[in-house]
Image (tube, rainbow, N blue to C red):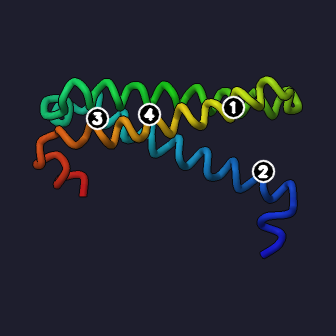
Amino acid sequence: YRNLFENTATVQWNHRVLAMSTAASIFGLAGVGVLNPSFRRVLTPQATKALVAMGVTAAGQVTLGISTLLMYVPVPLAAAHQLGSLVLLSTGLYTVHSFRYVSPVVLRSLG
C-alpha cells in the first residue's frame, strides 16, 4: 500500500488516471446536456451555462496539467494548475446547484 502513496511514478500515474476519468465524465455530461436536444429543451439556461463552464474549465485544467509536466514543472505553471483545481471544484458546485432548478423528469432519467 505504501507504493500507492510514496512512489513518485505511481502517484503520477494515479493522478493521470483520476484526471482523465474526471475529464471524460465532465465532457460526457456537458456534451449530453448541451448537445442532446431532449436534454437541452428541459435544462434551464443556468444549468446549460454551468455545464459549458464546467467543460471549458476541465479542458483548461487538463491543458494546464499536461503543460506543467511537459515543461518539467515550473512553479508558476504548477501554481496555476492548483488554482485551476479550485476553479474546477467551484464550477462543479455551481453545476450541482444549477441542477436544483431542473425539471425532476431530467433528474430521474439521469439516475
State the separation of the CA atoms marked 4 and 1.
Answer: 15 Å
Q: Secondary structure at mark 4?
A: helix
Q: Nearer the viewer, mark 3 or mark 1?
A: 1
Which mark is first along the chain, 4 or 3?
3
Q: Is residue 27 left or right of residue 5?
A: left
The residue closer to the viewer here, 96 or 71, is 96
Q: Position of residue 73 (x, y in %)?
A: 85, 32
| Cα–Cα span, label 4 and label 2 | 25 Å
Distance of label 3 from label 1 (alpha carbons): 26 Å
Q: Secondary structure at mark 3?
A: helix
Question: Mark 3 = which residue?
Answer: 33
Q: Residues within 10 Å of mark 2 (few under 14, many from 20)?
A: some
Residue drawn at (12%, 48%) of the image: 104
Which marked residue is nearer to the observer: mark 3 or mark 4? 4
Residue 77 in view (yes/no): yes
Residue designated by label 1? 81
Q: Earlier in the sequence, mark 4 or mark 1?
A: 1
CA distance for labels 2 and 3 = 31 Å
**Residue at image mark 2:** 12
Q: Is residue 47 above or below residue 96?
A: above
Q: Quadrant of the N terminus?
A: bottom right
